[in-house]
Image (cartoon, grey):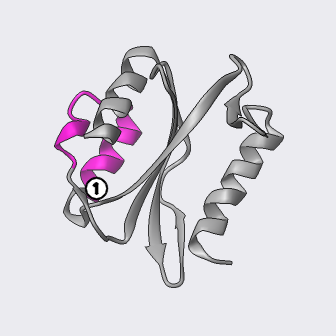
Amino acid sequence: MDSFELLEDKLKKMLDEHIITKSWLGTIYKPTGKKLKRFRFYVDPNFASTLKGHINNRQFTDIHKIKKCSSSNYLIDIRITEDGNICLFQLMEYIPYSFVPASPVVELHDADAKIILTWSKS
């Protein structure tokens, strides 16, 4: 199983839980019917433990301090509505030879979701 197949497995679990669905429009957040846009980027390994702390404490106001990079063994996979009101994301870690979950899937709403949207676009 390659690294992104694990991400898709997690997506399938979410589909099974009826949180999201796929349609010709893309990935949809079922409770609201809003389309989710996907962002993926690598996180500087020096900030991985800090990011895990943010996730565990559900504290995202300082997440903009987490540095992105062009390549790393940490990948963040984000699904977010265009208005930034709903966000689902998960930190993945590369363990040879695939990315595996390094955090649970986090579901955020409103202000916290908008923080992640701003960070993902920076």
Residue 114 position in % (x across, y down): 37, 23
Residue 93 position in % (x across, y down): 44, 66
| Snapshot quadrant of residue 70 | bottom left
Q: Would you say 52 lies left or right of 13 here?
A: left
What's drawn in magenta, residue-wise?
A: 48-66
Q: Would you say 24 lies left or right of 80 here?
A: right
User: Is 68 above or below relative to 119?
Assistant: below
Picture residue at 31% right of the left edge, 38% below the top: 121
- Residue position for label 1: 49
Instruction: Kindly tell me whether residue 85 is visible in this rendering.
Output: yes
- 61 falls in the magenta region: yes
Q: Which three-letter amino acid code belongs to the residue tagged 1?
A: Ser
Picture residue at 40% right of the left edge, 40% below the top: 56
User: Is 27 above or below relative to 94?
Assistant: above
Picture residue at 28% right of the left edge, 56% below the top: 49
* Secondary structure state at the residue bearing disc 1: helix
Front residue of this view, candidates 96 and 70: 70
User: Is 47 above or below relative to 20?
Assistant: below
Of all residues shown, which one is farthest toward the left? 65
- 81 falls in the magenta region: no
Q: Residues within 10 Å of mark 1 (few under 14, many from 20)?
A: few
Would you say the magenta stretch is mainly helix, strand or loop? helix
